[in-house]
Image (cartoon, rainbow, N blue to C red):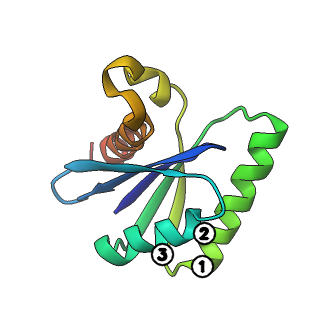
């Protein structure tokens, strides 16, 4: 399973095992013109059959448009089921100082953890 924490500058990425509940944050992807080429590499390496993406309840207009565009392209480009998950407070739950640049991927791991607990608890 793939878990994503969408941002207008970076995408946090985490690969997870739904049977055990274990997850591994991967390197953050820049949200630039190479994003989907880089995401292709992640998907081809890990072969996830399901994806969750964190979606905040409240979004500013430019973030909302970028999120919708990303979600649409993802659905069209990959033959992977994708589900939106409430991600409120996951980025704040990660200590940015301790995690430095990879905190977005740790947020993706928290998004998976929340989803896993809701679906297996």
SS type, badge 3: loop
| Residue 103 relative to residue 67: left or right | left
Rendered view: 45 above or below 27: below
| Residue 67 relative to residue 111: left or right | right
Rendered view: 9 above or below 100: below
| Residue 110 relative to residue 83: left or right | left
Rendered view: 2 above or below 65: below
Q: Position of residue 72 (x, y in %)?
A: 70, 67
Of callouts 2 and 3, the N-terminal one: 2
* Comparing labels 1 and 3, the label whose residue is closer to the camera: 1
Q: Position of residue 98 (x, y in %)?
A: 31, 20
Disc 1 versus disc 3: distance between alpha carbons?
Answer: 9 Å
Which residue is denoted by mark 3 in the rendering?
80
SS type, badge 1: helix
Q: How crowded is mark 3: few (under 14 residues within 10 Å), some or many (20 or more)?
A: some
Which residue is denoted by mark 1 in the rendering?
77
Q: How crowded is mark 1: few (under 14 residues within 10 Å), some or many (20 or more)?
A: few
Residue ranking furthest to the right: 61
Q: Residue 97 occupies which quadrant of the picture?
A: top left
Which residue is denoted by mark 2 in the rendering?
74
Looking at the rendering, in which quadrant would you find the C terminus? top left
Q: Do the residues labelled 2 and 1 touch (CB within 8 Å)?
A: yes
């Amino acid at each position: 399973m793939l878990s994503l924490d969408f941002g207008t500058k970076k995408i946090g990425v985490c690969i997870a095992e739904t049977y055990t509940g274990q997850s591994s944050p991967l390197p953050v992807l820049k949200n630039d013109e190479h994003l989907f080429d880089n995401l292709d590499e992640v998907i081809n390496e890990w072969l996830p059959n399901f994806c969750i993406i964190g979606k905040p309840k409240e979004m500013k207009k430019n973030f909302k448009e970028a999120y919708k565009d990303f979600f649409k392209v993802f659905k069209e480009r990959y033959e992977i089921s994708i589900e939106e998950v409430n991600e409120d407070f996951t980025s704040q739950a990660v200590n940015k100082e301790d995690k430095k640049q990879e905190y977005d991927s740790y947020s993706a791991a928290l998004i998976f953890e929340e989803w896993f607990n809701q679906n297996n608890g």
